[in-house]
């Protein structure tokens, strides 16, 4: 399928930016999906996921959470983040979540390289969530009200890791959101759940205890609040199992999760009373 892709500016004074993809052959307006990045930014993987969703018939948009007025802080420039990602991928799975082991691995680098990696790592962990949510909520407004390809249509969110947590947060903040998909992201606070109006689905790795151990409590709180939440846990999958650019990628879990994601999006983004084709004897 041929896609139309571009970087667009949006928000107050067009201070925010993001990567947009849409089917070139689509006629009229289409529902939209916001793709919320991992800590690595809107890198090749997130752009690929955005393209895959556009190829599935949606206007897909990945807001760049690190850019302001088209610029990234020096430690968060794509090439600097790519260096940190390459360093982390050279280490055994689990080191990222172990500060002592991470520091020991950094100590083996040259002073210049270590300082650059530590600076980028520090800024990534600082995570200005309120600022990120401003970009994300502005993106939903842009897709609903300004983007010609999706104006007036429903919007859902799909997020990964940091973006998974933001997808859940967006569901708490945006009463018009049609659906939220969480890939191995932290759950919102229990008191926030009462504001959720849309269905939520989650995908988690059984070997990602830091995140997945909190899923049962999240599911119980959602059920108690009368909200729709369907979690899926893949027992042998680690954190970031969907990211096919990393050693954590697990193809079976990723394939199943993506199929379920597309079915979920089709359900919550379809227009009411849309005509459905029924096969004979179905």
Image (tube, helix red, strand yellow):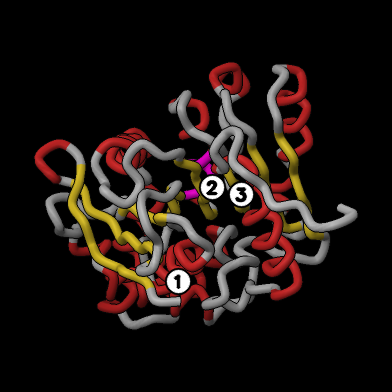
Residue 203 visible in image: no
Magenta range is: 163-167
Q: Position of residue 67 (x, y in %)?
A: 22, 54
Q: Residues within 10 Å of mark 2 (few under 14, many from 20)?
A: many
Q: Would you place residue 205 above or below residue 113 in this image?
A: above
Q: Is residue 159 left or right of residue 79?
A: right
Instruction: For the residues labelled 1 and 2, say whether their Cβ atoms are less than 8 Å apart.
Output: no
Q: Nearer the viewer, mark 1 or mark 3?
A: 3
* Residue position marked by numbered label 1 in the rendering: 48
Q: Quadrant of residue 215?
A: top right
| Label 1 or label 3, whichever comes before in sequence order | 1
Q: Does residue 181 appear in this view?
A: yes
| Distance Cα–Cα, label 1 vs label 2 | 17 Å
* Tag 1–tag 3 contact (CB < 8 Å): no
Left or right placement of residue 245 versus residue 260 in this view: left
In the orientation shown, which residue stands out farthest toward the front?
280
Number of numbered discs on residues: 3
Q: Residue furthest right?
A: 281
Q: Relative to 281, does residue 165 appear above or below in the rendering? A: above
Q: Main secondary structure of the magenta part?
A: helix
Give whichever of 25, 188 is nearer the camera. 25
Q: Secondary structure at mark 3?
A: helix
Q: Are marks 3 and 2 in contact (CB under 8 Å)?
A: no
Q: Residue at x 58, y 33 (%)?
A: 272
Can residue 166 be found in the magenta stretch? yes
Q: Earlier in the sequence, mark 1 or mark 2?
A: 1
Give the image location of residue 202, x and y in percent: 67, 46
Q: Which residue is mark 2?
A: 164
Residue found 26% across the figure and 47% down from its top: 147
Which mark's residue is nearer the viewer, 3 or 2? 3
Q: Which mark is residue 143?
A: none
**Residue receiving disc 3:** 266
């Amino acid at each position: 399928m041929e896609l139309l892709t571009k970087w667009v500016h949006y928000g107050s004074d067009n201070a925010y930016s993001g990567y947009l993809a849409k089917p070139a052959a689509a006629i009229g307006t289409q529902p939209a999906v916001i793709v919320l990045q991992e800590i690595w930014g809107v890198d090749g993987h997130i752009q690929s996921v955005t393209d895959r969703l556009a190829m599935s018939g949606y206007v897909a948009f990945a807001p760049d959470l690190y850019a302001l007025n088209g610029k990234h802080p020096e430690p968060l420039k794509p090439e600097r983040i790519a260096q940190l990602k390459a360093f982390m991928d050279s280490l055994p799975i689990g080191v990222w979540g172990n500060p002592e082991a991470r520091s020991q691995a950094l100590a083996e680098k040259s002073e210049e390289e270590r300082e650059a990696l530590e600076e980028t790592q520090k800024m990534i962990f600082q995570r200005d969530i309120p600022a990120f949510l401003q970009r994300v909520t502005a993106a939903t407004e842009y897709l609903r009200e300004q983007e010609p390809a999706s104006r007036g249509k429903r919007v859902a969110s799909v997020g990964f890791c940091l973006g998974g947590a933001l997808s859940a947060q967006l569901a708490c903040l945006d009463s018009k959101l049609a659906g939220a998909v969480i890939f191995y992201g932290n759950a919102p606070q229990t008191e926030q759940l009462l504001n959720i109006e849309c269905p939520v689905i989650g995908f988690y790795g059984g070997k990602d205890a830091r995140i997945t151990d909190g899923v049962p409590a999240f599911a119980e709180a959602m059920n108690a609040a009368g909200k729709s939440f369907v979690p899926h846990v893949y027992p042998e999958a680690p954190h970031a199992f969907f990211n096919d650019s990393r050693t954590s990628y697990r193809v079976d879990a990723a394939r199943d999760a993506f199929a379920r994601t597309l079915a979920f999006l089709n359900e919550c983004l379809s227009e009411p009373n849309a005509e459905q084709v029924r096969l004979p004897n179905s």
